[in-house]
Image (spheres, rainbow, N blue to C red):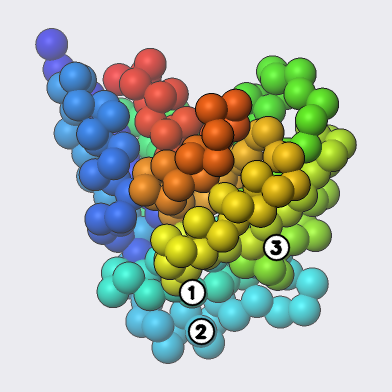
Amino acid sequence: MKKSSIGFVTIGQSPRTDVVPEIMKILGEHEISYVEAGALDDLSREDIERDLRPEPGDIIYVTRLRDGGEVKISKKKLLPLLEKKIRELEKKSDIIAILCSGEFPDFESIKPVIYPDKILKGIASSIGYKGRTAVLIPAKEQIDYAREKWSTYFKDLIVIPVSPYTSSLKDFEEIRERIRRENIGFVIMDCIGYTDAQRNIIRETGENIKVISTRRALAKVLSELV
C-alpha cells in the first residue's frame, strides 16, 4: 500500500518545527510522509515588512518566520504567495493542509486542501452551547475580526489576544485564571501556533472546561484522510 503524503503549507516560513512534529505525533500510527512549504519562504524579513505590511483596513494575520520570530502581514497581500505554494505542493503530496486558522477563499487545486478555519467552524456549528465562550487569538488588532467571525456561533463571547509565539507560559496561566474567574466553559484556540503545552495550561482551569485546539483538530481530520 502506497504511503500517504501530506503537504503542509504555512502562511509564514517553513519548516514549522513548532507545529508539524506535534501533528505528526498525533498521526503516529499511520504510514505518512510529508513535505513543507511556506508562503514567505523566498522573502527576507525586510522584504516581508516592506511588501506585506498591513495597510489601514487590512485583515491582519500573524505567523512565524524560520528564525522563530513573529510577523504580522496583510491577508490580501499574502493570498497570491500562498496560492503559489499550494500549486507547488500539488506535485509532491496527496493532501494539502494549510497551517493557519484564518479564513481563505477556496483555492483551486487538483489535490484536497484542508482548511483549519472550516474545521473549527464545523465543530462550533455542531455544538449547542449557550454558556460563555472565549476565543484566543494572536494579536489585539484581530479582536473585531474575531468577534465578527465567531459571534455567529456563540452569543456570550469573549475574545482574548495572546500570542503563541511571544507570550510566556505565565501569560497563559494568567488567562487560565481569568477563564476561571469569568466562568468561561468553552475555549477555542484560534491559531495553529498554539502549542499543546499552552493548551494544557488552559485545560487546567477545571474538569468542566472544553478546549478546542486548532492543530489538534487539524490532526484529527487528517487522521481520517490518510
Query: Callout 3 environment at 10 Å: few (<14), some (14 to 19), or many (20+)?
Result: some
Above/below status of 96 relative to 51: above
Residue drawn at (70%, 48%) of the image = 181
Question: Quick one: SS at disc 2?
Answer: helix
Amino acid identity at mark 2:
Glu
Q: CA distance from mark 2 to mark 1?
A: 8 Å
Viewed as shown, does residue 148 lie left or right of 169?
right
Question: Quick one: SS at disc 1?
Answer: strand
Residue drawn at (57%, 71%) of the image = 73
Question: Residue 18: percent from the left, percent from the top?
Answer: 30, 55
Above/below status of 156 relative to 80: above
Amino acid identity at mark 3:
Gln
Above/below status of 196 relative to 209: below
Viewed as shown, does residue 153 lie left or right of 109?
right
Question: Residue 128: percent from the left, percent from the top?
Answer: 76, 18
Q: Which residue is mark 3?
A: 142
Q: Which residue is mark 1?
A: 71
Residue drawn at (28%, 74%) of the image = 67
> Of callouts 3 and 2, which one flags the residue occurring earlier in the amino acid sequence?
2
Q: Which residue is mark 2?
A: 49
Amino acid identity at mark 1:
Val
